[in-house]
Image (cartoon, helix red, strand yellow):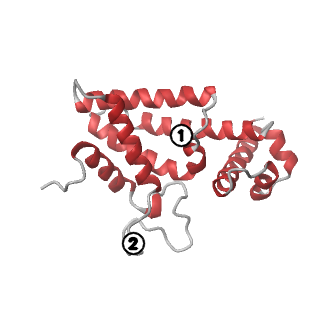
C-alpha cells in the first residue's frame, strides 16, 4: 500500500509539473496536451484528476503548501524577524519559478488554496509587525514585499550577465529547476536584495 501510494504521488507530481510547463506556454492547453507532456496516457491524467479545473486546483494547493513549508522552516514565531524574513524569502524564491502559471493566475483560488494562502499571509504580517514596528501599514508592506518577490523570481536578468558568475547553473541545466533561482542567481543574494529594497529603498547604503 505504501509503495502504491508513493507511486501515485510521483505520478501526480509528474503530471502537475508537466501541466505547469504546458499551461505556462498556453493557458488554454488541454488535458490531452498535459498527458502528452507528462508521457502518460490521457486516462492516467483523468484517473488522478477528475477535470482540468481539478488539476489546476491541485496545483494551486501544492504550490501554496510548498510556500507555507518554506515559511514555517524559517521559524517565524521564534527566529529574529530579520533572519526569519531572509530565510523565508530565500526559500520562496526557490519555489516560485517552478509555479509561474499557477501562482500568477488571477482567477479566485480554490477554498483549500485560499486557506493555505491566508496562513502564509498571516505569518508574513506577523514577521513584518515585529520587524517594522507599530504604526506600520502591514497590508501595504506585504503588497510591496510580494511585488518585489515577483520581480526577483521572474524578472529578466541584467543584460551581459557573466555566464560563469557564481550561482549560474551549468550548461544544459534548467535555471528554474528546484533548488535554483531565476537565471541561476543565488537565492540568498536575491533575498538580501528584496529585503534591503523593502527596508531601505533602491538607494545603495553607505
Q: Is residue 3 visible?
A: no
Please provide percent x and percent y for residue 36: 80, 57
Q: Examine the rendered structure and indicate whether residue 122 appears above or below residue 24.
A: above
Which of the two residues, 137 or 13, is positioned nearer the viewer here? Answer: 137
Label of residue 184 in the image: none
- First in residue order: circle 1 vs circle 2: 1
Q: Are marks 1 and 2 in contact (CB under 8 Å)?
A: no
Residue 58 falls in which quadrant of the image?
Answer: top right
Q: Residue at x 72, y 40 (%)?
A: 55
- Residue 122 appears in which quarter of the rendering? top left
**x, y (%) of residue 34?**
76, 52
Q: Position of residue 137 (x, y in %)?
A: 29, 28
Residue nearest the observer in this picture, 76 or 142: 142
Structural crowding at the residue carrying mark 1, measured as other residues with C-alpha within 10 Å and reported as few (<14), some (14–19) or many (≥20): some
| Image quarter hosting the N terminus | top right
Question: Which residue is at a point 41% across and 41% down the rendered structure image?
Answer: 146
Q: Is residue 120 left or right of residue 8?
A: left
Residue under the image location 73 percent in, 36 percent down? 54
Residue 86 left/right relative to 106: left
Secondary structure under the numbered disc 1 in the rendered image? helix
Q: Residue at x 22, y 24 (%)?
A: 134
Q: Is residue 106 above or below residue 167?
A: above
**For numbered disc 2, what is the local secondary structure?**
loop
Q: Residue 159, which numbered label?
A: 2
Q: Which residue is mark 1?
A: 66
Amino acid at each position: 500500500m505504501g509503495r502504491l501510494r508513493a507511486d501515485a504521488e510521483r505520478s501526480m507530481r509528474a503530471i502537475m509539473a508537466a501541466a505547469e510547463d504546458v499551461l505556462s506556454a498556453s493557458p488554454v492547453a488541454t488535458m490531452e496536451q498535459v498527458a502528452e507532456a507528462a508521457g502518460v496516457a490521457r486516462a492516467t491524467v483523468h484517473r488522478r484528476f477528475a477535470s482540468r479545473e481539478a488539476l489546476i486546483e491541485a496545483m494551486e494547493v501544492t504550490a501554496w503548501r510548498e510556500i507555507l513549508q518554506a515559511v514555517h522552516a524559517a521559524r517565524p514565531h521564534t527566529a529574529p524577524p530579520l533572519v526569519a524574513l531572509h530565510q523565508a524569502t530565500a526559500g520562496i524564491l526557490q519555489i516560485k519559478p517552478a509555479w509561474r502559471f499557477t501562482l500568477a493566475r488571477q482567477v479566485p483560488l480554490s477554498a483549500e488554496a485560499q486557506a493555505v494562502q491566508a496562513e502564509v499571509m498571516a505569518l508574513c504580517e506577523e514577521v513584518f509587525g515585529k520587524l517594522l514596528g507599530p504604526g506600520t501599514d502591514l497590508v501595504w508592506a506585504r503588497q510591496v514585499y510580494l511585488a518585489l518577490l515577483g520581480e526577483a523570481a521572474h524578472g529578466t536578468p541584467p543584460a551581459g550577465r557573466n555566464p560563469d558568475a557564481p550561482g549560474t547553473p551549468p550548461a544544459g541545466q534548467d535555471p528554474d529547476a528546484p533548488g535554483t533561482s531565476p537565471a541561476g542567481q543565488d537565492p540568498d543574494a536575491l533575498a538580501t536584495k528584496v529585503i534591503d529594497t523593502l527596508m531601505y529603498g533602491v538607494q545603495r547604503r553607505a
